[in-house]
Amino acid sequence: MKFRKWLPVIVGCVLITVILASYKVHQIRKAIEFGKSFGEPSEVVELATTESSEWQQTITATADVVAVQAVDLTNELGGRVETIDFKAGDQIKQGQLLLKLDTTEEEAQLAAAEADAQLAALALERNQKLAKTGVASEEARDQALAQRNAAVASEDRLKAIISKKTIRAPFDASAGIFELEVGQYLQPNTMISRLVGDTSKVWLDFYLPQRQSSLALGDEISVMLRGEGIKATVIAKDSWVNPRSGNLRYRAEVDNTAGKLYPGTVVTISAPVGEPQTVSRVPMNAVRYDAFGPNLYVLVPAEEGAAEAERAAKRRVTLGPEQDGYVVILSGLEPSDRVAGNGAFKLRDGILVKAVDMAAEDKTADTSEPTTGQ
């Protein structure tokens, strides 16, 4: 009896719930239909200008700048400095007297040796005359000859010592800074000054890994100097690979008429590796980055009936060097691909895109612009 009493209430609640649910479903359907009337969202971007170009893979290394002619001037024999006939930074000529050590003792010995040589020469001459007449024996003549030769050798030895203590320039050069004073005693093989010859051409000595050293004689490398690339030509390579480092030594020659490279300095060089490749270049603003690395948005045809003709497709790429606002794409992009440029930051994978070719519009505007005359 109690159930019959509450039955109308239960039926009423169910009816109210059904009515409310039906009304809510109707509202949701209306909202969906209203949303569909707006169409799928899309973004407008500028079409990037993609260029194809030859690209050469390179490897960078450090190189020592070496003078073609350079020597550390030293004294072979010890002695006291008697005269210094040049200054630091002087431009000296080949054969010019640079420094003279004290040779007073050697010069005195040389005078005595010259006198002995003259006396020995006279004795030899007399013995030769006597030997012809039979008065002197051949043995006496031979002894006189040996004494004359010994005297001449002693004279030559002293002249050589004096010459070694008189130091002259071996070639035309620029003298380096030195610290010597007259009266100073120099031990044998003391560093006097560094002489550097003509630097209108200099050498670059550098090492490359064996597996990446495909340079041949005559190939060109680039020297990076304060943002400027200077060309150098490979003129030699070593005959063996360093077994510890696995590197091969090269030498290149570079024109240094402008005097920008100084012997003894270290510069950065860029050397080609392998053969040139044909690659694509895109503006740097077309490249986007996420947690997985660089990517581009390539524009692909949309399905039939879509509001726009293209959709954005995210494409992973491998980047190369940057130059003049463009970046080289080593992999991940085909030459025929259309790439989103300025405005690519608004895109996501699969979104409809309207691409505007600004370069084509600029050309059209230029051709349609009327000309005026006087």
Image: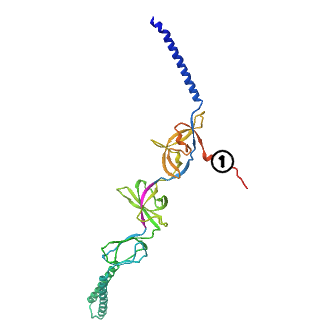
Q: Residue at x 56, y 40 (%)?
A: 299
Please identify the quadrant where the N terminus is shown. top left
Work out whether 229 lies above or below 305.
below
In percent of width and height, residue 67 lies at 42, 67
- Going by the numbered disc 1, the residue's amino acid type is Ala
Work out whether 9 lies above or below 340.
above
Residue 191 counted in the magenta span:
no
User: From this viewpoint, which residue is outermost toward the top?
Assistant: 1
What range is drawn magenta here?
Answer: 59-67
Instruction: Work out whether residue 149 can be spotted.
Output: no
Q: Residue at x 53, y 40 (%)?
A: 346
In percent of width and height, residue 338 lies at 56, 43
Q: Which residue is mark 1?
A: 365
Q: How many numbered marks does the figure carry?
A: 1
Which quarter of the figure has residue 301? top right
In percent of width and height, residue 86 lies at 40, 76
Pointer 1 local density, CA inside 10 Å: few below 14, some 14–19, many at least 20: few
